[in-house]
Image (tube, rainbow, N blue to C red):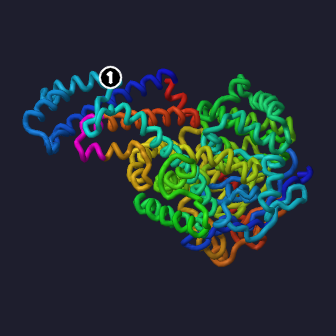
Amino acid sequence: MLNYILKRLGMGVLTVWFIATATFAAMHLVPGNPLANEKATNAVIRANLERQYGLDQPVLTQYVIYMGNMLKGDFGIAFSEENRSVNDIIRETFPVSATLGLLSLLFATAGGVMWGALTAIYRNRWPDYLIMFLVILGISVPSFVFAGLSQFAILHLNKWTGVSLLPVAGWGSFRAMLVPALVLGLSTMAYLTRLMRSTMLDVANTDYIRTAHAKGLSTTRIFLHHQLRNAILPVITVLGPSIAIITTGGFVVESVFAIPGLGRYFVQSVAQLDYTVIMGTTVFFGAFLVLMVIAVDILYGFIDPRIRVEASR
Amino acid sequence: MSSEIILEVTNLAVEFATYGGSVQAVRDVSFNLHKGTTLAIVGESGCGKSVTVQTLLGLIPMPPGRITAGSARLRGAELLGLSADRLNHYRGKRIGMIFQDAMSAMNPTMTIGDQIAETLIVHMGMSAAAARQEVITLLTQVQIPEPERRLRQYPFEFSGGMLQRAMIALSIACQPEVLIADEPTTALDVTIQAQILQLLESLQQSRGLSIILITHDLGVVARMAHEVAVMYAGQIVEQGSVDDIFYRSAHPYTVGLKAAMPGRSAHKSVLQEIPGSPPDLFAPPAGCGFNARCPHVMQLCTSQAPPLFGTSHQARCWLQHAAAPAQALYQQLIASVRS
């Protein structure tokens, strides 16, 4: 098992290096640089600035310097903000994004597993039809629509009850996190519901469920002890990529709800061609993702004994 | 057979609703299972033998399945039509069941020990520790070596034969009176088959088990069964003691089955078959279900379904009628096949 984990981590480092290199290359292929649209500068000042940031060096040299700094854990200074290192930006804003992401992931998996199981139990009856209709809605409607609609709903709810039940936007209290997390997790929840439904139905038709019935176990016990654990395996597999979608896709929800997360920088930096922030956020998100996928794989091994053995071979 | 009747099935009929219409999978099946004996139900794939026994425990999916007639009584208590809750007092506790492919019939994400212990905890109210001890005893009884280590393993760590032993341990855990074995040896190779059959025999003797054995292997029948029911197209076509079936076959289908068995003699190099295929159960033919394939078909057979003739040895064939013109000839034929 340890061997397996080490191997996966080694592959992960390689992946992150590849992400960093590809981003670096793509970034430098785009015409212009972060200083190109500074209005008040003349050619001399610009040359001086470029020298200070090292932008006058050949691209390959810049790459070597950047990678060297990155290995030391230094992502450099942001171009777009005064005296702020990329490390500071990540340190300050990532916990916010992570909290939001984690909460929405919790919503998504709990909801997905529950609704999926429910639709399987009520297969081809009205609860199934209703939930599956909502699932299609959840998958096809983009999150900014839900974000706007939910703000609208909160507004009217607060007006109607006369007290401020939930804040419309902002960050800080748990109450403020609730709705954004729900909105962010909605499409993943819908996707997981569909997946859970189909795996539940698959499992219900297996021989070992028939054996469980032949053993005289109650339906509830069969559902909890036999069906759920086997049906949940594929759901866990897609959890890794789901974490990706949720954490990186958070910027829309973050900007609608005015949440000071990392997503904003992730998007803004590309528009401003802010080299260091692009690199910092991309590599950081990339590394985070890779780590999550590995974590899910290891978790998978704990739930499915067959994988544990294959991994240790 | 003088011993008491444990399980009595009468006039059972099961049909399945499908898009193409309803399939009459089991039609008018009756049999008795006597204490401490083995009843073999023989027949080719799709003849309704598995559906018959799974119906007894409510294991067929309903809908599309539907029991249209009949009763099944375990020591006089009706099983059919019971709610799942009531049925759970019988399932696993008074009637154990073994399935064909143990690898798919065991939960892949649960240890063997937990799967066996589960029935003990649910039915016998045992504590987890007591159940574990009992599992060790059971695994020893079915001759699985190193039970303490084996019970912590998962199904994929077992071989097919070992897993079938574990399945047997599971099915007899709560001391059931009846054991239903649905093709228990089909997925195993011949050597392991023999071991499993031997195990079932010794369990039958030590525990007085009554076994319903479903198989399409006449060799297994000859070795294990006391009584035999031959099924064809959802009906029992012949029923009797194992000697009746093998030495005094009364139905042309049974005769055909026996002839199709590969013999030991070297010069019988071409396997004999029964020409044709089983009838369409969406629309069972008028008269006898076997008429299209029967070498002795008469005009009556295509219009009127034969009843079961006989008392202890029964056959659903018009040739058994006292007025059947070909009966004498037929008896001669059987004699020639036998020799």
Looking at the picture, how far across and down is residue B61, in whole percent?
66, 61
- Which secondary structure dominates the residues rendered in magenta? helix
**Pointer 1 chain:** A
Graded by Cα atoms within 10 Å as few (under 14), some (14 to 19) or many (20 or more), the crowding at tag 1 reads few
Residue B22 in the image, given as x and y percentages of width and height:
61, 72
Query: Is B126 covered by the magenta stretch?
Result: no
Residue A205 location in percent, x, y?
Answer: 60, 54
Of helix, strand and loop, which one carries label 1? helix
- Residue B108 appears anywhere in the view: yes
Direction from residue A229 to residue B56 in the image, left or right: right
Left or right position of B49 against B81: left
User: Residue B324, how many percent across, how many down?
Assistant: 73, 71
**Position of A291 relative to A136 (above/below):** above
Three-letter amino acid code at the position of disc 1: Leu
Seen at 70% across and 47% down, the residue is: A212
Asked where in the image residue B129 lies, by quadrant, the reply is: top right
Identify the residue position indicated by label 1 in the image: A71
Q: Which residues are magenta?
A: A268-279
Residue most extreme to the left: A43
Image height of B15 relative to B167, above or below: below
- Name the residue: 77% across, 53% down: B244
The residue at 86%/38% (across/down) is: B207
From this viewpoint, which residue is outermost toward the bottom?
B303
